[in-house]
Image (cartoon, helix red, strand yellow):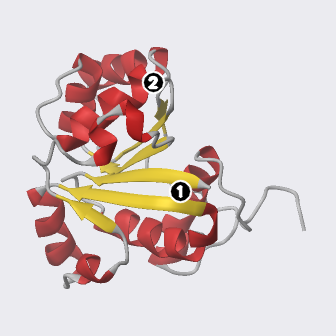
Amino acid sequence: MKKIVVAVGGASGSIYAKVLFDKLQILKSQTEAIAVVMSDNARFNWQYELGNEDYISYPFDFYEKKDFMAPFASGSAKYDTMIVCPCSMGVLGRIAAGISDDLTTRAADVILKERRRLILVARDTPFSLIHINNMKTITEAGGIICPAIPSFYSKPATFEELVGTVIDRVLDLAGFDLTTYRWSED
């Protein structure tokens, strides 16, 4: 049973967070806890890009961005995986520099110091050398950079299916047992 933290950053790409939430609901039998923290920009982007506030209807435990009493703000709570989706270059940079100025960056700091799984779904383009160096720093610290770059070999027919190619990869990296398109498999 997994204890997962999902941070929804303020980068464009709310569809990635929505598909992740949808798939986590499907995989709920594999989870003990799903905790969510959303930035103000994440809420705004969800409303702007998806035209609704449906994030509030998901059956997850939501925490405010400055709630340092959230259980995953400490390694003793033993959350094993954190996914930041989408992850802006600003959040990625603060994580790389060890700046724990909100719940997202504090939780990422905890996950890295405890040698647990941190997956950042980078959603920006193009990358500057600063971005690349920050990604290198996080990778060297044990984090995983999984850019929001969809694949096409499964022949996705909708935006959600296209986004699902990235989210399925993220869930694979998080250790979930899921049915998804696999290259050269029937």
Which quadrant of the structure image shows residue 173?
A: top right
Which sits in the foreground, 84 or 113? 113
**Residue at left offset 40%, top offset 41%:** 77
Give the class, few, some or many, for how many residues have Cα within 10 Å of label 2's Cα (few <14, many ≥20).
some
Name the residue nearer the viewer: 74 or 181. Answer: 74
Q: Quadrant of the N terminus?
A: bottom right
Specify the amino acid type for callout 1.
Val
Q: CA distance from mark 1 to mark 2?
A: 26 Å
Q: Tell me if mark 1 has few (under 14), some (14-19) or many (20+) residues whose alpha carbon lies within 10 angstroms of its own.
A: many
Percent across and percent down for residue 155 are 66, 71
Tell me residue 90's x, y (percent). Answer: 18, 35
- The residue mark sitting in front, 1 or 2, is 2
Is 49 on the left or on the right of 168, as rendered? Answer: left
Instruction: Name the residue carrying label 1.
Output: 166
- Residue 55 location in percent, x, y? 27, 76
Left or right for 119, reference 13: right
Determine which quarter of the picture holds residue 114. top left
According to the picture, the residue beneath numbered tag 2 turns out to be 114
Residue at the far right in the pictured view: 186
Percent coordinates x, y for residue 43 in the rendering: 15, 67
Residue 117 against residue 53 in the figure, above or below: above
Q: Is residue 152 visible?
A: yes
Kind of residue indicated by mark 2: Glu
